[in-house]
Image: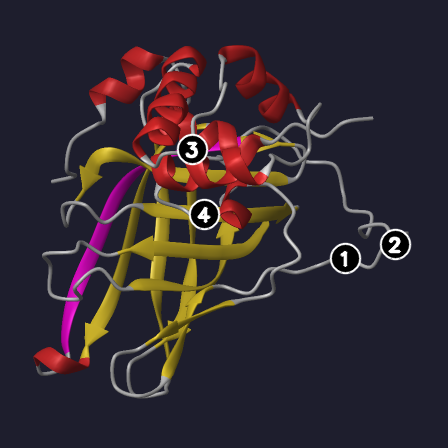
Amino acid sequence: MTTPNSALRAVRMGLLMSQDEFARALHDAGNHAGSPNDANKRLVQRWESGTTSAPRPLYARALEAVTGLPIESLGFPSPVLARIADDGNGGHDLKDPPVAVRTPGTKPAAQTAPQGNYSGVWLSSYEYVSSGRGNEVFPGKHYVLLLQHGNRITGRSLPGASLNPDSPLTLDLQRDGSTVTGTWTEQTATEGYYRGARYFGAIQMLAEPTGRRMAGKWVGFGKEFDVNTGPWELSLMEASTTKATLSKYNRPPE
């Protein structure tokens, strides 16, 4: 039995692209990189349905170019545990979050069946302290598209829907009753204060019985080799994933 790739679907829909448009973007990315590919709507459908569980390297590179995300953040398995990048100061930094690799033959732990569905457009709001700016507290806001399949919830901010321009946010969450736990990744703007740095960490929230709000805490690393934390909240705007709804919220939150 195949498992749909809701992470890839959330990212594609968050980019406001149809499967056809996404395939054309992959094709164009391949041509631009000098590695032509034959991406088409049917291939995208096979990825999203889980019929094809992993893309060939040719397509993986195109997927990363179009989405701006590492392949392991798009719902595909990867044997890579972490990526290391030169920090420009004679050292190295962890570039992307570690990816768990399940031992062959093992099965994920059984979890309770979800009640309700959290698919829709949500307002994501968090706060963080900037040590480089006098420990001032700053807000982070995005309109995000959440898609739920079984107990898994994946999210991606809409392309024009962040308080700080060009800072896409992705969420990979697991729901167990009223508890929602997972990871977050944010790619900061190249021209912004953090100069395109990628930040990531963990998140845990409690979902209200109404199904319209989740609130909890995030945790992540800082520049001074410290671990930071702060509040995070998700508020439901509309339980709809239509293109018209996504276009409506493709703007910076107030």
Check the image and name the residue furthest to the right.
105
Q: Amino acid at mark 1?
A: Arg
Disc 2 to disc 4: CB gap under 8 Å: no
Please name whichever residue, 65 or 130, is drawn nearer the observer in this view of the structure: 65
Q: What residue would you read off at disc 4?
A: 171
Please name whichever residue, 72 or 214, is drawn nearer the observer in this view of the structure: 72
Q: How many numbered discs, if any?
A: 4
Q: CA distance from mark 1 to mark 2?
A: 7 Å
Q: What residue would you read off at disc 3?
A: 35
- Residue at the spot x=65%, y=46% of the render? 77
Q: Amino acid at mark 4?
A: Leu
Say whether disc 2 or disc 4 marks the residue closer to the N-terminus.
2
- Specify the segment rendered in magenta: 136-147
Q: CA distance from mark 4 to mark 1?
A: 20 Å
Q: Secondary structure at mark 2?
A: loop
Say whether disc 1 or disc 3 marks the residue closer to the N-terminus.
3
Disc 4 to disc 3: CB gap under 8 Å: no
Q: Secondary structure at mark 1?
A: loop
Residue 178 visible here: no
Q: What residue would you read off at disc 1?
A: 102
- Residue at the spot x=61%, y=48% of the render? 174
Residue 192 visible here: yes
The N terminus: image quadrant = top right
Disc 1 to disc 2: CB gap under 8 Å: yes
Q: What residue would you read off at disc 2?
A: 106
Residue 101 position in % (x across, y down): 71, 59
Please name whichever residue, 118 or 162, is drawn nearer the observer in this view of the structure: 162
